[in-house]
Image: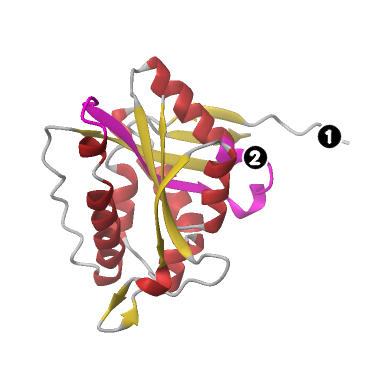
Amino acid sequence: MAEVAEISYELIKAGEEKEIVEFIRNYFLKDEPLNNSLDLGECKELEIFSTESLCENVSFKAVRNGEILGVMINGIVHKHSEAPHTDFSGHEKFQKIITLSENLEHQCGIFERFPEIERYVDGRIMSVSSQARGLGIAGRLVEETLSHMGKENLPLIYIQCSSFYSARVLEKLNFEEILSLRYEDYRLEGKPVFTPEKPHENIKIFIKRI
């Protein structure tokens, strides 16, 4: 039997946008519960969102034999910086996701909750290819991020989990849940905005101090 190559975990660097966008199209676009719920379709705005923070050198990929098996896309939020002004309104469905995300981040108020910190890591996207699930890749990507944060003096990570499975990963890594919202309770004009399939019933917010 041929030996299976080991999976390596590497920082994603600026210049790798094309490979990351391809992975996002193939997996995250189709598998993420909110994307799936809205039938997001082609979304250049998501591709921009997925790559605009790569230059900050805090995102990781899992690779085997040159193939990307998973990604964790992170960005850095600074206390005194203005919120990014990227306009996603050209894609109405994706804007619904961004609006929910921004509302939740505002509710959590990380800098108000922890006034001593000047910046934190925002875990934006966690995705593993359908062929590589069950190998512990998501958890390892989080661990690689945490290790890197320690080296870079980044004191806290904040992650919104729209997926039941990603929330389980963080729970196993002893993240602290600070907010949970049932999709059934997030409504416009009396109707739920998102109706993902079970077991995805909540969006949960987790943090971890380093």
Q: Which residue carries the number 1 mark?
A: 2
Q: Which mark is residue 136?
A: 2
Q: Position of residue 131 (x, y in %)?
A: 66, 51
Label 2 is placed on what type of residue? Gly
Q: Quadrant of the N terminus?
A: top right
* Residue 181 image-quadrant placement: bottom left
User: What amino acid is at disc 1?
Assistant: Ala
The colour mode here is secondary structure
Q: Please tell me which residue lies in front, 136 or 114.
A: 114
Q: Earlier in the sequence, mark 1 or mark 2?
A: 1
Q: Position of residue 66 (x, y in %)?
A: 58, 35
**x 46%, y 27%: residue:** 146
Q: Is residue 142 visible?
A: yes
Residue nearer the viewer, 185 or 9: 185
Kindly report the distance in space between the C-alpha atoms of the residues bearing marks 1 and 2. 22 Å
Side (left or right) of 24 relative to 14: right
Identify the disc placed on residue 97.
none
Residue placed furthest toward the top: 151
Q: Nearer the viewer, mark 1 or mark 2?
A: 2
Where residue 125 appears, as percent x and y from the top left, is 41, 47
What residue range appears in magenta? 114-139
